[in-house]
């Protein structure tokens, strides 16, 4: 997905986020944790369970497995370039991860909630990557495809007819 020039990283359109999420098949999760209480664990699980191929990245756990997935020490250790790099690191560390994502040929850099690095985003965009900052792909998928309303959370969307489910949500019901 090509990102328009001068994108407003404070306000992504739903169409833009859908386009990003629909265009990726493989996601490297940098900062993945084996602790089921940590957000990076359940985001990895959710994405894997919903049709994405995930690569957990954590140098301290390299060679081990999380949810049956081999953990890699870094993006350069992956068997193939990921479509998207989901960054569960702080904003300062996101710069180095973004540079690594550019180097390995990723298409998308996604910085998790509270993670924003405008300089890294500018480098990625200059290299042709799509960038999303301060968002969670799990939460965006749930919001965009109506799943979040099914669990009793207000999605701020009022509809009179049932929304069609994306193919990978059908197996959940």
Image (tube, rainbow, N blue to C red):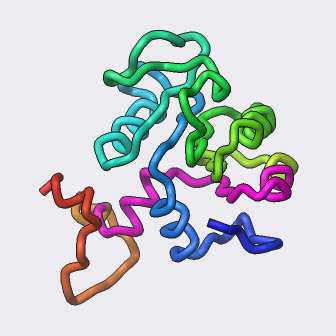
Q: Is residue 5 above or below residue 129?
A: below
Horizontal and vertical percent position of residue 38: 45, 28
Q: Is residue 134 above or below residue 154?
A: above
Is residue 73 among what the camera can see?
Answer: yes
Nearest the eye: 10 or 154: 10
Horizontal and vertical percent position of residue 35: 41, 20
Q: In this view, does 112 lie above or below 68?
A: below
Horizontal and vertical percent position of residue 79: 54, 27
User: Which residue does the image show at 32% across and 22% down from the upper left?
Assistant: 68
Residue 129 part of the magenta segment: yes
User: Which residue does the image show at 75% across and 43% down from the upper left?
Assistant: 102
- Left or right, 126 with respect to 153, comes to right
Which contiguous range is marked in magenta?
A: 122-147
Q: Which of the image's four quarters has the N terminus?
A: bottom right
Q: Which of the 4 quarters of the picture holds residue 74? A: top right
User: Which residue does the image show at 81% across and 73% down from the upper left?
Assistant: 5
Q: Which of the image's four quarters has the C terminus?
A: bottom left
Q: How many marks?
A: 0
């Amino acid at each position: 997905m090509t990102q328009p020039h001068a994108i407003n990283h404070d306000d992504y359109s739903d169409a833009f986020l859908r386009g990003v999420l629909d265009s990726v098949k493989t996601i490297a999760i940098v900062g993945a944790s084996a602790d089921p209480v940590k957000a990076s664990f359940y985001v990895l699980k959710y994405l894997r369970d919903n049709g994405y191929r995930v690569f957990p990245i954590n140098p301290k756990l390299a060679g081990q497995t999380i949810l049956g997935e081999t953990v890699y020490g870094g993006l350069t250790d992956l068997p193939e370039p990921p479509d998207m790099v989901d960054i569960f690191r702080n904003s300062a560390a996101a710069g180095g991860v973004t540079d690594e994502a550019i180097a390995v040929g990723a298409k998308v850099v996604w910085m998790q909630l509270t993670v924003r690095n405008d300089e890294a985003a500018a480098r990625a965009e200059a290299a042709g990557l799509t960038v999303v900052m301060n968002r969670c792909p799990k939460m965006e998928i749930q919001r965009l495809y109506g799943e979040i309303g099914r669990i009793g959370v207000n999605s701020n969307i009022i509809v009179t007819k049932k929304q069609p489910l994306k193919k990978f949500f059908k197996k959940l019901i």
